[in-house]
Image: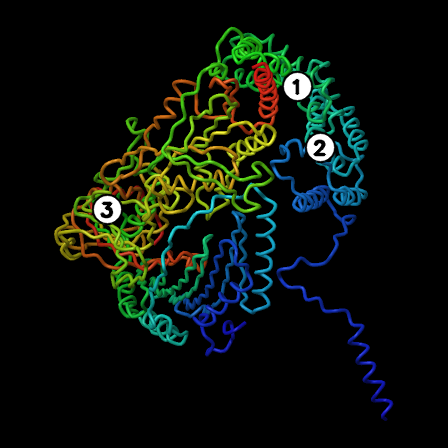
Amino acid sequence: MHNTKLILTMLVTMTVCVAPSASAQTLFSRPDTTPNYAKYQYIDQCLSAIDRLTREADYKDPIWRDTAHYDLIRLKRPLPANAITAGQACLARFNFDTINTLPRAREAGEALLKAARDDDALRLYRRLMDAVSEEDRQRAIFSLRRLYEEARPMRVAAAKELHERWLADGGHDSLATMMQAYHQIAEMTKAVGDTASARRAGWAAVEANDRRPVEERNTGQGLQRTWSIKNLLEWLTADEAADSVSRSTASYGTFVQTKIYGRLFGDTLRGRGASLGRIVPDISGDFMYRFSSESPSHPAPAKEGLASYRPLSNDQRTRLPVPGRINAVTFLNGGCHEDTRPANNPGRSNLSGRCWEKISTLRRLKHKFPDLEITVVTHTFGSLGSAPPFEPAREADTLAKFFLGFHRIPGTLVVSTTPYFRLAGFDNRRVDEPIAYEENFYQAVGKPEGIYLVDETGAVFYRSAGGGNPEDELIMERLLRAVYSRVRKQEATN
Amino acid sequence: MRDLLKKDEAAPRLLSEATSKQVVADVKAFCGTEGVLDIMVQSWWNSGQRWARNRASLTSDQRDVEVMIMRQLRGAQVRVYLNQVDTESLRGASALVNYYAENNARNQGDDLVLQVPRWPTSSGIDVWSEKTFAHTETESGRVVHTLTQQAEAQGFLSAGYIAANAAYAVTYERDDFGRETHKSGRATQAQCSATVRHPKGTGSGWAGQASFDLHRVDFTNIATVAFDKCLKSIDPVRLEPGRYQTILEPQAVEPFVDAVMRQLRRRFAERQNPHPFKLGYDQAVGRVRSKLGLQVLDRRLSLFHNPMDPLSGTHREDGVNEVCWVKDGILTTMWDDYDYALAELDSPNPIRNRRSFVLSGTATTTMDEMIRTMKRGLLVTRVSAVEGIDQTSLLHTGFTRDGLWLVENGKITKAVRNFRWTESPLFIFNNVEEIGPTVPTFIRYPNRGSFSMRNFQNALTAHMVPALKVNDFSFTSTIDAI
């Protein structure tokens, strides 16, 4: 009896010990089940699975936007291995030989490329092209080309080949579409470092533009297309530009007018070239702050807490742009302010877009050119984020905290108080009036937007479109290197 | 579950204050001390009794709880809702919020936003009636029995419903600067709607009342009025459509006032899209002007919200005093959200939307007097199926329902078949002949989802409007429905 009791006790104990731990699944933890992708019934389910795994991997290993432009990430970064494996497992059960319509082929082609089955995707499209009419064949080529361009990593060689075949077959219906096709090839090949192909295609695009009538290049949609290859032309002529700016700003101005704007738009004077060589009026404002952290530019704002900065009293203020130094002057106005509101609703209020990109560009430029003097000009709006309205001084302090502390812009922040009046009666809305300095700047130089690079004499030698374009940044970098080289030579001579 | 959702009747209908606060305290403890934290614990109770063809058809008692946890860390915001208040569930939900908030804040630079003090929000609401909250199905059953018996005794058919709702919420807010705000709010709603119809479908009468306080819902009066209207509307005659001088009973006026109220959002009136209260673009200041300051209604009419009116329940809402939208016909105020108030007004006190309203008029007269002084016109009990047709003119269309009579030489002479009408409230309120005393009307309370204590703004308590005698009301066609 005693033994029986002991055995029973042991059995109970063993049962408790070997029983699987009841890992309680709550409503808030993901169930620990691995999906069997091989059992998925539809191709779009495979695509969803691949996309989900890709998102999860990207989420765990994000690329900070200061590191590289998003498009470059997309072009170069392969899909995560587990997404490719899942795609292959999922697609193994499908027979692609039965697909005979373009929409289905597009879905299947995308899935095949994501599963690294490029040959099967090509075979699928070849079979489709053989079976359809000439018109549909062109659509199929276009569809496949888009798949190659949008794949991750981009299938540059294959897309380029299709582009070139399309051009050779006379698929383009105008010089503008031909220009766009060459432009696309140039952008793709440039992104993956195939500079020779990029230059060839780039010049072909520019030459296609040269052949377009001047009226078309300067009006409506034609004008937009002309603008679209401006950065490409700047990239193609970067050596020449650097050479001219290393001689003088005036020489660079002439170069820009003749070799960039003259070539793009014909014998017309267009926009941004007009500000080159103009003298920036002395920058003034009611409040000034100076960034003073040791590590000015790297890597991410606010991750290490706020950077330090200090207000400048009247006697501490220096002339801006700083004479004898190379300056970058930019305006952070409406966009940045608007984006900050309301903070309690980030879905709509992310400080995103050009403002962020412009600030990232400034930080990187300062990192590469420590002598660069950065001046950020802004003005008060009366309120920021979802905070109750500010007095101008307090708003200026908050802006300094935001731009210099939080965003770590390594330079000087100048804040003007915006004059305003209120509409009479029940309306009572605030109407802002023009700010004196911005008006002066507009009259003297041009629109207060983008990044202006100003030489040691106070003359503008470059103005970027918005400030967040990676190509603009490359050009700015190139020009700054040339200008600093010239300045150092002059200093050595003196 | 701590003290909710137990089947025995003795169980509380709402989470108690102590339990709600304990849930808040638990979540606070589970979530980190950094960043913004919002917690809302809300419980609600809906009870209802429905009847049709003189027979009770449904008795319901629904209760639920909702816990919302929102954490915002350097701009990355995560929000979770759950309807469980046990410690383990709260811990799990808080862990989820913390995980995503911290990861998003670390990884997604795009979401970083300027950290500024947040707007002060309303401190709560208290529109409460113990009578409503204590209402039981037994009481409802008794009322339904009386109403149906009365109809059955007269050989008529009766249908309708009685509802009593309540909600209680406790919230906690912590801003980027660590400032904490605790709020709580509670509200009740009660309503009764009854329709009496002739068994052959030749006549129909309706009456209904709604209030936060069940004391103010007079079941006997509802039954009497519905029965009386049904009796008087039997065998209606067909009348030519056209423009008639019309007496609109308060219940018929209410949808038109509601339509105007819905357009009082300033953001929409001051942009380029068509809007009834948009004036036009003012080139001198570069802004679209609204009709603020201009006459939009009859000079004798005023439209306002009075939170202290005992008929609408006494609100306890900081910073929300009486709001006068239209004073003596002049548009004086429009409501909008914080964004717009900040962007356009730099205002620390944006006028928020109020769901209750009062339309009142000077020189009021009684319904009997309106009828006595009418030479030839129509008397409308209520309207239904109201739909907007045109945004700019605020043109609406709908049907008359449950009692429409012809008035001739100061007397009601016959029941009239229902009409489709097509009319704009702006036209109606600018063609007013006489105005009655302002009384509460029946409101169809929105479903539970809208009876939320979130923001403490949505306690719909009362729509109070007068009867109006208006000229040239446009009835566009007769309809067959009784």
Say above or below: A94 vs A276: below
Say above or below: B10 vs B371: below
Q: Which residue is mark 1?
A: A181
Chain bearing mark 1: A
Q: Name the image quarter holding residue A217.
A: top right
Q: Name the image quarter holding residue B204.
A: bottom left
The kind of residue tagged 1 is: Ala
The local crowd at label 2, few if under 14, some if 14 to 19, many if 20 or more residues have their Cα within 10 Å, is: some
Residue B55's label in the rendered image is: none
Q: Which residue is mark 2?
A: A76
Which of labels 3 and 1 is toward the front?
1
Q: Quadrant of the N terminus of chain B?
A: bottom right
Q: Quadrant of the C terminus of chain B?
A: bottom left
The local crowd at label 1, few if under 14, some if 14 to 19, many if 20 or more residues have their Cα within 10 Å, is: many
Q: In front: A130, or B472?
A: A130
Element at label 2: helix
Q: In front: A158, or A186?
A: A186
